[in-house]
Amino acid sequence: MDQQQGIPAEQINQLVNKHFDDALPKFIEILKIPSQSRLFDPEYLTNGLLQKTAQEFRDYILASNLKNAKVELLEDEGYSPFLFVEVDGSDGQADGTVLFYGHVDKQPPFNGWKEGLSAYEPKIVDDKLYARGGADDHYSVLGAVIAVRTIQELGLKHPRIVMTFEADEESGSVHIDHYLAKLKERIGAVDLVVCLDSGCGNYEQLWITTSLRGMVGACVTVQVLDEGVHSGDASGVVPSSFRIQRLLLDRIDNPNTGEVVEDFQVNIPGERYLQAQKAAEVLGKTTLTKFPFHGTTQPTTQDYFKAYLNRIWKAQLSVVGADGLPHAKTAGNVLRPETTLKYSLRLPPTKDPKEAEAAFVKILTTNVPYNATVKITGLGSGSGFNAPQNQPYLDQLIQSASQLYYKKDVQTLGEGGSIPLMNTLKEQYPKAQFIVTGVLGPNSNAHGPNEFLHIPFTKNLISCITYIVTGLQVHLKK
């Protein structure tokens, strides 16, 4: 028993572990479904894979027999599915509202999985569940449901609970606005948002995400000819579309250092700067070694703090795709008419994405070398997230939970990725507090091969959330 809160911490952990183990076979079956998010599956509305995933999770929630719960699967025409769960508070409507968020869509399988592992054939190795989508972010459904179920079965109290699980996050969360608008009255005022789609710096303590980067993305095409021509005849006269792409890339980031121009940077808030120093100290060499560098490849810096800051508060550019390039083995000696690159520009958490979009277009289309044609398609952006300050009682609950289940202090974390919805919820519910956390730790490799869910860490995380949710009920009573 945790004497400070009167909460049976050990019983919570035991019951969470039992419910997770009981749910694991069903969870593994769901992970076998080869579904992909909208942007990666043009037939997502007709092949039934996203729908099947959502349906299987709905069935799991229903089978969990949460008390005073309404479980709905919304499948509005033209939109990806959306799971919505309402659970009445233990003491009626005066309990305040906690909104859980997660997503049930996933990235493509990618290649490079280790021998014996694959995206859609889940396998547990050394307490890690390898499969696409397990950690990002299918586990979130289990996390929210098991937390509430555990509270109810132990006879504890909880606030009113709203669970929202979208199927469009990996495509930019475009569809969720439709559902949130439709459900606005039913969701009501929100006191606490619990997002289970973030990461952790290690598997040894509770990590709370305080910032997420935004993003600008687009396909940029440089065209110099109407058709390909003999490279021996044209080179030296016709400029290479690839070389022009290189020149355009150099307008955004320094080719030697990777540093992005000031148009996309911000001044880092003092509190976040100090938190970053502490996090980099805790993470140490993990800041660099968490990535699978090949051979003798070195990171951009050996300074842990600078590397961490680069990843969470600095704009960074990546080229994540290309068109117009034939396979190397079969490429002829042809000067190609055009080159298309997909730019992914991560933005600092507080950078206005629309301002960044405008700067992006201006930089790439003004005074183009050789007056070549530049076409920008699929331009889109998303806001970053800078978490609001929590109330002292919530910070104390979070710290107590980390000590109880990990035996270490809680640690704050900035994440380099994006969760588009967080800033939307921050604006929509200005009085809400936020717990943004997750299981994506070192080598878990979301979006890439060998993605895994660290099972012991996940169980303790769910125990932490359970403890916090039942512990804050007294504070949220109206």
Image (cartoon, rainbow, N blue to C red):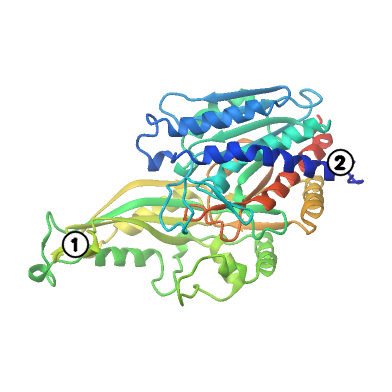
> Which percent across, then down, holds residue 182?
54, 24
Q: Is residue 287 visible?
A: yes
Label 1 Cα crowd, 10 Å radius (few <14 / some 14-19 / many 20+): few
User: Which residue is depicted at the point 64% across and 54% down?
Assistant: 127
Q: Earlier in the sequence, mark 1 or mark 2?
A: 2
Label 1, label 2: how far apart the Cα atoms are: 66 Å
> Which percent across, then down, holds residue 233?
7, 69
> Which percent across, then down, holds residue 131?
52, 48
Q: Nearer the viewer, residue 134 or 7?
A: 134
Report the amino acid beneath label 1.
Thr
In the displayed image of the protein, which residue is found farthest to the front?
116
User: Which residue is depicted at the point 63% across and 43% down?
Assistant: 195
Question: Does 72 appear above or below 460?
Answer: above
Label 2 Cα crowd, 10 Å radius (few <14 / some 14-19 / many 20+): some
Q: Which mark is residue 407?
A: none
Q: Which residue is mark 2?
A: 7
> Which percent across, then down, holds residue 358?
39, 51
In the displayed image of the protein, which residue is found farthest to the left?
233
Report the amino acid beneath label 2.
Ile
Which-is-in-front pick, marks 1 and 2?
Answer: 1
Q: Which mark is residue 330?
A: 1
Please tell me whether mark 2 sits on a helix, a strand or a loop.
Answer: loop
